[in-house]
Image (cartoon, grey):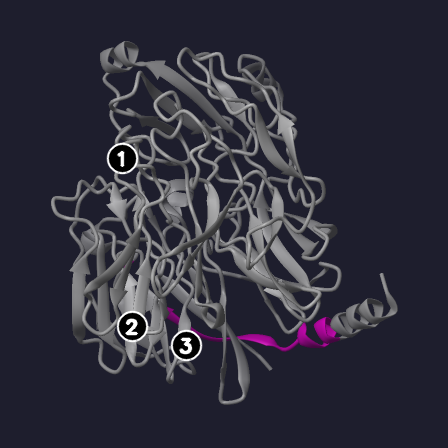
């Protein structure tokens, strides 16, 4: 560590000690949306990051109601309810935020609408369907759009494992004033399956007229015999010209994905030695650093061989890209107990990238990550990114079409327990489950999650502390790390950015599977977090709380 960084870390430590006694709850607001229509959904997750604009704090619920709050008191000004279609075949029910531009609030909905409402009173400006009706619930919008130079650019969430010919993961751009479609970009080759959609938040470099897309896996998700090759733009970071949708470059993090290893979070805009770069976090726990102008890696990557599939018709990629530095989570599975050990020995396991099998394969890290949608927060002053990572295993088994049909399984959707995906139109259905014991605890040794500080320029780990399973992420602000996304506890932790030691914590009414937001109000720093649980993994404890803390 050089002299400057040492002095900076000391200053951060002193600041953290001073702040520890100065964080206090300012207000709590309940949205009333924990159980609309009198019933809580096992698919619901309160993942919103509230945003401040023009004297109002905007919140969106898992059911797409937008609420404008007073930032100082939490009192509501107005609520807009799009009245989404109430049905049971959504793959998930969540909304991760809105975007506000020039007096208009833009957001997507579970029933695939893009909506623009007036910031002042919540009245409707326009709305348009991204996906034509009828929509079977497999095509949704769960992350906020980006807005630039009069354009609203938006992706989609497309259900995994339902059909080989899933909807295509087309990214669309609309006129911000009228809702008229202006351009679209399709990540999938014509006539070769679908998806590779952008369900996670996007990044916008407005000065360079560039939008960065984190794409997901192609369909069918767990059998690639119908989509031979590397699936060019799937599981990638793709850069487009924001004004026109023109393709600029792409970097693929996983070739021929068979594991649901989407690029799960917003590509982070960073600077390295004064030059623009992009930091990429993955479900595998790989950290990639790219030149923002070209997409070329700035840290060394090796194409390494990995185990091949023994499933008839499958042709696994011979290699996968692996960074020489920048692995931020455990990638070797160690069973925790006798029962878990017995089950482990019944599965195929050849380390990371073990392909799905008819026998049943252990995937570690699993589809929850490693990182997930909200897991990184970048501090420009120190060049440090703080990452939340899971250490969870998944068991995947392919099932012949005849066996699956005879068993009569339906599509149960992604969840903590057992999931079945028919993959209609392919030779195989699939079953998938998080590898947990009878009590629902992960079968690998603890910790089941970590919070890790990474040096952006080198990929090296500065510090790491144990945490819990999370689907949200941290917020770095003023030398502090706010993190509350823990499944097995309801605690908001505050850590020192310098070394990761805890300086403050408080109990939340529900787990917070979200990323905190921050804003300044009347000269005071506020940190606000949505705490409402997660129906897929914490379904018995769903809530609706928005809690603001003042840092004096």
* Of pointers 1 and 3, the one earlier in the residue sequence: 3
The residue where tag 3 is placed is 52
Q: In which quarter of the image is residue 7?
A: bottom right
- Specify start and end residues of the magenta stretch as a single range: 15-33
Question: Is residue 368 in view from this perspective?
Answer: yes
Q: Distance between the residues labelled 1 and 3?
A: 36 Å
Residue closest to the eye, 171 or 454:
171
| Structural crowding at the residue carrying mark 3, measured as other residues with C-alpha within 10 Å and reported as few (<14), some (14–19) or many (≥20) | many
Q: How far apart are marks 2 and 3 (CA)?
A: 11 Å
Element at label 3 = strand
* Of pointers 2 and 1, the one earlier in the residue sequence: 2
Question: Is mark 2 in CB contact (under 8 Å) with mark 3?
Answer: no
Element at label 1 = loop
The residue where tag 1 is placed is 166
Q: Residue 66 carries which label?
A: none
On whether residue 26 falls in the magenta region, the answer is yes
Q: Looking at the image, which residue is at 30% across and 39% down?
A: 159
Q: Nearer the viewer, mark 2 or mark 1?
A: 1
Q: Looking at the image, which residue is at 64% across and 59% down?
A: 385
Image height of 157 relative to 313, above or below: below
On whether residue 251 falls in the magenta region, the answer is no
Q: In which quarter of the image is residue 242?
A: bottom left
Image quadrant in which the N terminus is located = bottom right
198 with respect to 409 (left or right): right
Residue 432 image point, x, y percent = 41, 26
| Structural crowding at the residue carrying mark 1, measured as other residues with C-alpha within 10 Å and reported as few (<14), some (14–19) or many (≥20) | many
| Residue found farthest to the left | 134
275 with respect to 63 (left or right): right
44 with respect to 303 (left or right): left
Q: Residue 105 carries which label?
A: 2
């Amino acid at each position: 560590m050089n002299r400057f960084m040492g002095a900076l870390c000391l200053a951060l430590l002193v600041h953290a000690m001073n702040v520890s006694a100065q964080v206090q709850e300012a207000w709590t607001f309940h949205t009333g949306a924990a159980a609309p229509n009198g019933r809580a959904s096992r698919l619901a997750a309160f993942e919103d990051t509230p945003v401040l604009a023009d004297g109002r704090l905007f919140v969106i619920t898992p059911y797409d109601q937008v609420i404008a709050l007073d930032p100082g008191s939490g009192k509501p000004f107005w609520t807009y309810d799009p009245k989404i279609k109430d049905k049971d075949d959504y793959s998930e029910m969540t909304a991760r935020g809105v975007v506000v531009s020039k007096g208009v609030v833009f957001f997507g909905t579970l029933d695939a609408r893009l909506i623009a409402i007036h910031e002042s009173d919540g009245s409707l400006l326009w709305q348009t369907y991204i996906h034509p009706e009828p929509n079977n619930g497999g095509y949704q919008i769960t992350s906020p759009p980006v807005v630039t130079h009069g354009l609203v650019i938006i992706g989609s969430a497309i259900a995994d494992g339902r059909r080989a010919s899933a909807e295509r993961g087309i990214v669309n751009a609309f006129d911000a004033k009228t809702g008229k479609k202006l351009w679209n970009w399709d990540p999938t080759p014509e006539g070769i399956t679908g998806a590779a959609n952008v369900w996670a938040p996007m990044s916008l470099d407005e000065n360079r007229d560039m939008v960065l897309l984190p794409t997901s896996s192609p369909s069918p998700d767990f059998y690639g015999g119908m989509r031979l090759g590397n699936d060019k733009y799937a599981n990638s970071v793709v850069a487009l010209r924001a004004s026109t949708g023109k393709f600029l470059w792409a970097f693929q993090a996983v070739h021929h994905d068979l594991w649901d290893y989407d690029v799960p979070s917003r590509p982070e805009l960073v600077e390295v030695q004064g030059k623009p770069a992009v930091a990429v976090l993955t479900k595998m726990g790989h950290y990639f650093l790219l030149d923002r102008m070209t997409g070329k890696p700035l840290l060394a990557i090796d194409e390494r061989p990995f185990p091949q599939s023994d499933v008839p018709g499958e042709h696994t990629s011979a290699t996968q890209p692996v960074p020489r530095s920048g692995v931020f989570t455990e990638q070797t599975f160690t069973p925790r107990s006798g029962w878990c050990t017995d089950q482990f020995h019944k599965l195929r396991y050849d380390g990371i990238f073990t392909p799905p099998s008819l026998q049943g394969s252990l995937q570690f890290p699993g589809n929850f990550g490693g990182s997930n949608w909200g897991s990184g927060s970048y501090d420009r002053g120190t060049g440090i990114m703080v990452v939340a990572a899971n250490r969870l295993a998944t068991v995947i088994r392919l099932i012949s079409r005849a066996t699956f049909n005879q068993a009569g399984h339906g599509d149960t959707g992604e969840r903590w327990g057992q999931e079945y995906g028919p993959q209609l139109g392919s030779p195989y259905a699939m079953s998938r489950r998080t590898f947990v014991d009878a009590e629902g605890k992960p079968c690998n040794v603890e910790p089941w999650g970590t919070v890790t500080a990474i040096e952006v320029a080198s990929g090296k780990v500065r510090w790491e502390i144990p945490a819990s399973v999370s689907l949200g992420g941290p917020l770095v602000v003023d030398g502090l790390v706010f993190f509350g996304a823990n499944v097995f506890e309801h605690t908001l932790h505050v850590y020192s950015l310098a070394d990761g030691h805890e300086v403050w914590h408080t109990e939340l009414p529900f787990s917070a599977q979200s990323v905190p937001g921050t804003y300044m109000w009347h000269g005071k720093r506020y940190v606000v977090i949505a705490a409402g649980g997660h129906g897929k993994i914490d379904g018995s404890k769903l809530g609706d709380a928005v809690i603001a803390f003042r840092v004096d």
